[in-house]
Amino acid sequence: MNRNRRTNSVRESDTRLNDSDRIIEGAGSWDAIEWTKIDQPISRPVPHGLSDFLYEAEEVLAEGYGVLVNTDEAGTLFVTNFRLLFLSEGSRDIIALGTIPLATIERFNKIVIKQQSGPRQSDKTPTRRLLQVIGKDMRIIIFAFRPRTKQRRAVFEALLRCAWPTRLWDLYAFSSGPSRFSNTSPRVRLVNEYLRLLGVESRHSSLSTIESGSFTSSNNWWRISDINATYEMCSTYPFSLLLPKSIRDEDVLQACKFRARCRLPVISWCDRRTGAVLARSSQPLVGLMMNMRSNADENLVGALCTELPGGKRGRRKLYIADARPRKNALANGAMGGGSESSSNYFQSEIVFFGIDNIHAMRESLVRLRDYLDTHGTRSSDGMSSFLRHGGWSWGGGNLTSMSASVSTLGDSGWLIHIQNVLAGSAWIAARVAIESATVLVHCSDGWDRTSQLVALASLLLDPYYRTFKGFQALVEKDWLAFGHPFAERAGMAGLSGSGSELPRQSSGTNFASSPMRQQPGTFPSQSSMPNQTQTSNNYSPIFLQWIDCVSQLLRMYPFAFEFSSAYLVDFLDCSLSCRFGNFLCNRQKEREQYGVSDACGCLWMYLDDMRASGGSSHVHYNLFYDPSKHDGPLLPPAAALAPTLWPQFHLRWSCPAEAQAGEVEAQCRSLVDRIAELQKAKNIAESKARETIAAMEAVKAEIRNEKQISSTAMNLARKANRENDIIKRAIQSLGCRIHVSGNDDCTINIESNLNNLPERLTSSRSTRGSPNAYDEKTETPLSVTLTPDEDDDVSENPILRVCENLCPQRTRDGGCKWPDSSCAQLESQFLGLRANYDAFDRLSIYDSYFQPE
């Protein structure tokens, strides 16, 4: 349509598109979206950087250029063997809203909207070609394509081929393989959980013990049985069961015939301290007249009620919790089912919880999704709820219409269903924790509402299940092992017939009215896939509803859970995507039959790897987790069971800004990270301070050692000075004068008249009080250098012999007390010295220096 023919309600789109790719968006209605006329289709090759966004073994099958109408963003839509991927043209990045795994798609439709032509367009009727994709994760996506390019057809046909595989092996989980997320044996984990419940954690199971059949164990009350090891007794139960120790296997085989699908009463959780038991089963086959009985079943149920602890008399009370409304239980009697009679079970009480069936849950989710898409800030028609229909969605000044629009949330019934499941689970937990009673829970088949109630009550009773490892054990035990039909309920590929065909399950409800809010003058037509013959009426968001209940408990008790709401969202997305094999098929027997755990990756390993990559600050960790505050059962009162929408899941597509309910948590996480960095810096500073202190102590020790060495050296120096003074005085007493120059040269002046030496020595004795007095006129100085003379014979030199005899450092055996002195090194070679030896013989003034022999 030419630009001059556009109405005033039409404006140009974002400048991200060029002239040939422009889409015109209406300011007030969906119908104002129109395409410009183009002459030639534009082909766009696959971007070179697309491989950076693809997973392992993910292959591109088809592509088409279009616009994500929800956000009015242009880009390329790729269909791979795993997902529908939308790559933005502007940012060259994946748009999360437009990217959805194929298994998460509930249905998709081709839509053509024809507008009423104006007076000048009588010969032409403009049309818009759209592709509508409805997801199981609360989003509705609309893609628009240019007309006459056949790009929508290519994408649609690729979705037909890949979104509805006919064989199990065509799923992406088998194409990608286990990779690095290999799965360990679910059997081993189940038996280890049984051992934990029995209180024998010291014993651990292994694959070899299970294959050999030696995994059975027991305590005083209960035992692990291998009666269903080959799945012959019940194909939807696990291979090992936790049963009362007093019941024989023969009685168990007889009792299973009285329950629907042979799902007999077995223990799901038990308190080894009090003996309280939480058991599960399917409905009893009491018949139309409600008069059928089974002694084996009654004995088995009675054995669940052990004696009260602490020496109390009597047996504990038995509660039989029927999750269905009473009228539904009575109606099932026409098909052979029904409910128990309290008169047939000793000291028992029957309670009906009134939780609706899977069909009511499915319709409730559809209404909730329509409500969010209609009143969200980002709807599938690309229009805000504040602008739609002139603002009537929020009253438009009319309080009555505003109240009517807001009340549609209550009309969906979703929160009422959540409250019913929470209330039933809290009631069960209170009976077990407060009364130490035994509670037997069942619905019709015992794998939908029963799994919800038992798993949620176990979560309330046992703090272990509120950790990462315990949550995995809980899901694997009460949902996977006990046969919740994930393939049918979650709409994933399930086995049928011989197991080779895998029809995709989907809701048969028509969703066209949700995104296509028809305006006057529009005539929509659509082509929907799959048709009614290809769908199953068993699709229902039972597991999603249970995860929603867990998020409500996490909101009420933020200190009790190790994991966060973000972990629940990622966990639910992975379970819906079919990327891993944990939630494929309808029961554990089928997963083992087709080797799913060996051929596919493990969801739990993937989530563990995500947390390991982010450390303790990863978003999956609950910042407020404090196990000491809730180390026992959680027993919420009825007044606290007021559920709200789960923002992180329900609002993330329609109200992305309001979905950030975890913004406070994100800021707290940022503060925690900052505190951790500061603590790390503090630890580093303290470590450096300790190193500095240690270095200072070492320096102090060295200084003390140096001072000690210096003190020792000073003492030695003072001693040497005293000895030098002694030697000097001794030599001076011989009439010699000693002078030591600055360069350590020693000069000795000796009188030339050696004949008068005795008189001088005698005179010296008489002038002992003045040792420095001498007659300078009578002495003739002679300089002698203390160097050895090779020609001098020491033995013939009398002066040397005198020096040796008179040396104060000589010992009695002829050694020297001062071996390092120069006289010892030079052997006292005073060259040219002549002395009066008679005068030396008469010396007596140095008796204190020269000791008599």
Image (tube, helix red, strand yellow):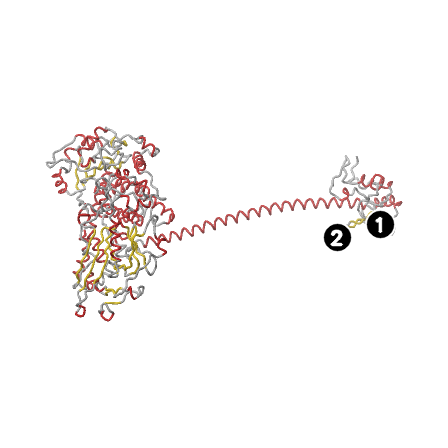
Q: Nearer the viewer, residue 747 or 355?
A: 355
Q: Residue at the spot x=75%, y=46% of the render?
A: 725
Q: Position of residue 277 (x, y in %)?
A: 24, 36
Q: Nearer the viewer, residue 35 or 726?
A: 35
Determine the residue located farthest toward the bottom in the rendered image.
4
* Secondary element at tag 1: loop
Whether residue 429 is visible, yes or no, is no
Kindly identify which numbered label has been placed on residue 782: 1
In the image, taking residue 706 as reference, residue 569 lies left or right, namely: left
Residue 236 x/y as whole percent? 23, 37
Residue 279: where, in percent of width, then height? Answer: 23, 36
Where residue 197 sits, quadrant-wise, is top left
Q: Quadrant of residue 651?
A: bottom left
Q: Is residue 840 left or right of residue 584?
A: right
Query: Mark 2 to mark 1: distance in Å?
Result: 20 Å
* Residue closest to the eye, 223 or 118: 118
Q: Which residue is mark 2?
A: 742
Q: Give left or right: position of 709 versus 32.
A: right
| Disc 2 + disc 1, Cβ < 8 Å | no
Mark linked to residue 700: none
